Amino acid sequence: MEIKDIYSKTQKFISIACSLPLEDVVVENQGKPRDLKPYISFYLRSFRSISQPIVRELDEDGVQTIITPTVCTASFKAVSDDLWEAESFLHKLRNAFNTELQNSIFNGELALLRVLKSVSAIPTEVDLQTEGRAILDLELNFNVTTKDNVGMIEKI
């Protein structure tokens, strides 16, 4: 799985798990105007390999395929005008990682490794109104596939 696939599949997963339209699930830090509430934003960070490659194959054309176990931190933030709605979204999301929905979206290529920060409410004052916000941090485990044309000495 490539990292760009993780972003698109995570967006779809959040949309289905929280019953939100796809446009209400956004990637954080995109430098665009603020979305209409309610919405969930997320970003992935701290990508790191956790072992040596588990697969290293070379085909007859000289293309090497390397599969490396990797983990990353996924940070989610829900924003809503209703006080409990933001927390509710993230609880639904957290629980969806233990259902068959995870396998149907990620096809068994990504799994929840552990919860780094449970759902936490952060009510915030915005224009003299309380805005419901909640955050959740998860550590996700997946395999990164890298293809590299190393060439074959017989074909040079």
Image (spheres, rainbow, N blue to C red):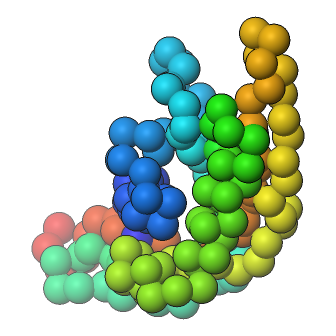
Q: Looking at the image, can residue 69 be seen?
A: no
Compared across the picture, whether 105 is left or right of 6 comes to: left
Outermost residue to the top: 127
Q: Looking at the image, can residue 58 be seen?
A: yes
- Residue at 58 percent of width and 78 percent of height: 97
**Relative to 75, residue 10 above or below:** below
- Determine which quarter of the picture holds residue 82: top right
Where is residue 99? Give x, y as percent: 52, 86
- Determine which quarter of the picture holds residue 136: bottom right
- Residue at 67 percent of width and 58 percent of height: 88
Point out the image quarter for the N terminus.
bottom left
Where is residue 7? Give x, y as percent: 45, 54
Q: Residue 155 versus residue 124: which sits nearer the camera? A: 124
Q: Residue 74 versus residue 87: which sits nearer the camera? A: 87
**Relative to 146, residue 11 above or below:** above
**Relative to 120, residue 133 above or below:** above
**Relative to 10, residue 43 above or below:** above
Point out the image quarter for the C terminus.
bottom left
- Determine which quarter of the picture holds residue 51: bottom right
- Residue at 47 percent of width and 79 percent of height: 102
Q: In this figure, what is the number of numbered marks?
A: 0
Where is residue 148? Give x, y as percent: 35, 66
